Image (spheres, helix red, strand yellow):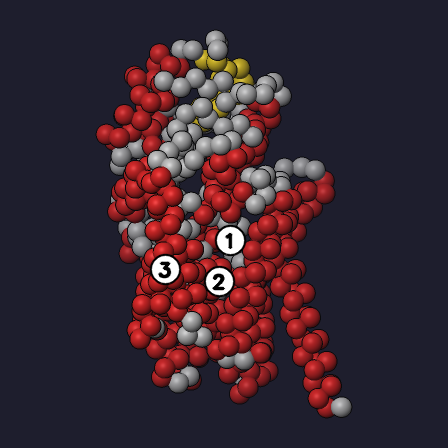
Amino acid sequence: MDGIGALKGRARKQFVTALAVLLFASLRLCHIHLLWSDEDYHLAAALNILHGKLPYRDFWYDKPPLSAIYYLIIGAHPGWLLRLLDTGYVLTACYLIYRLARAWWGEAEARIAALLLAFFLAFYLPSAVLPFAADALMIIPHIGAIFYAFTHRPFPAGLCCAAAFLVNPKALFVLAVCASWLLASLVPLFIGFLPPLFLAFGAAWLAGCWSGYCEQVWRWGWIYASQSPVIHPLHTAAVRITDWLGFHSVITAGTAVTLVRIDRRSRWMLSSWIAFSFASSCLGARFEPRYFLQLLPPLVLAGSRGIMIACERYRRITLVLLLATLLVPLIRFGPHYASLAYDNLQDRQPPWTDVRLDLDSQAAASLISSTAQAGDTLFVWGYRPDIYVYTRLTSDGKFWDSQPLTGVPADRHLHAGNPIYGGPAASNRLQLAATKPTWLVEGLGLLNPNLRLQNYPELHNWLSHYQAVGRTRFCIIYHRLHP
């Protein structure tokens, strides 16, 4: 009877854990009417693919291919499908961290790890945890690679690293962790890692995408990473790292307890995983909040064990501190979900500053869609890929935003005008001038006059074929005068 009672108790705890994880993961459904920066870029890339275009050859895409392929699952649609897909991704990631924590520590730690991962993928800056761009999309293959490396299965660990690399080049840091743990099994690790990449790169070469891939992902990416707009990187690092660790203080403190109390081998493995993940988060000296998603899995795993160690010795005070530390992000970010859900029920726009560009894009897309016809094409000057997603239109040329045309990346083009990619950008503008999109949206000039379309002489004649037909707060909408 005691055994039956224990099984029922375990099943009850697993059910409650699963229910809580599902609740946290489902909160992103409140954002069904919004798109966040970067997820819109990959959605628009998937839309291009659905129109028969290949990335790197037929349209500019400066990210590895799986980031766009992920959104093909839902046909590049926003709304319910998008948020359900992302909810499923979070649930899968939580299941994997549960499996890893159970293999490493035990059942109790596994439940805690799943809860913590779901919690912190909900209660932090929306721009960091809501869009499933490269950093977020790497979470599943990242955890998968670590799980297989920990259970000493080097070949599937290598496969997961390859999948992660085709999402985000920072996966090389995940590979470094696996290699450091599997020194005696490097051959099967790299047999798992290299062939999928050779197949992907071979397919790109055969399809005529290889040179574009090298230019857009690696050359542009290297220039972007090496020229950070952060003026005071040490101060920025101190502030943003402190902020992130503060909001994640429960797993930070739990990790500290774990590293003190566990055996030497586990301490070394966890320390190496944390160190490589932290180094990856700091790459490029930007310290963007979304970059720390690579640090989240190791701290969740280590923190889950630290919480259990503390509960075993000081249960009451640990529970009080646990509640207090979790209340900070809950109070800071929880009301956003409630207010957004209420706004959805009232069918009104949220009064948030950080979604004003998306709402403006929705207004611009509505003006275009009201008169657009089948076969129409679109070009958007600026980094406003959400307009493509909302209109379901694509460009008729290789370029569909202004970054490769001005040489100024999106992380600075709202306030700066100095290009980091000047020579190729001038050549790219000549290619743009040969295209004839039906619709043209000037989505940058009103925000940064230094980068107006009219500032580029090689586009003057091209622009003369368009007439302004509408305007939003941040966009001017043009229609081509003649076919």
Q: Judge from the rendering whether residue 392 lies leftward or rightward of residue 245; answer left or right.
A: right
- Check disc 1 and report its element: helix, strand or loop: helix
Q: Is residue 214 above or below residue 178?
A: above
Indicate the quadrant where residue 16 lies. Answer: bottom right
Q: Residue at x 45, y 24 (%)?
A: 396
Residue in front for this viewpoint, 179 or 250: 179
- Check disc 3 and report its element: helix, strand or loop: helix
Q: Tags 3 and 2 in contact by the CB under 8 Å rule?
A: no
Between discs 3 and 2, the one toward the N terminus: 3
Spot occupied by residue 242 in the image (x, y as percentages of width and height): 39, 62
Q: Amino acid at mark 2?
A: Phe
Q: Amino acid at mark 3?
A: Phe
Q: Which residue is mark 1?
A: 129
Q: CA distance from mark 3 to mark 1?
A: 28 Å
Q: Residue at x 72, y 40 (%)?
A: 346
Residue in front for this viewpoint, 410 or 348: 410
Q: Judge from the rendering whether residue 70 lies leftward or rightward of residue 234; answer left or right.
A: right
Q: Closer to the observer: label 3 or label 2? A: 3
How busy is the neighbourhood of tag 2: few (under 14 within 10 Å), some, or many (20 plus)? many
Tell me the tag on residue 193. 3
Between discs 3 and 1, the one toward the N terminus: 1
Q: Which residue is mark 2?
A: 247
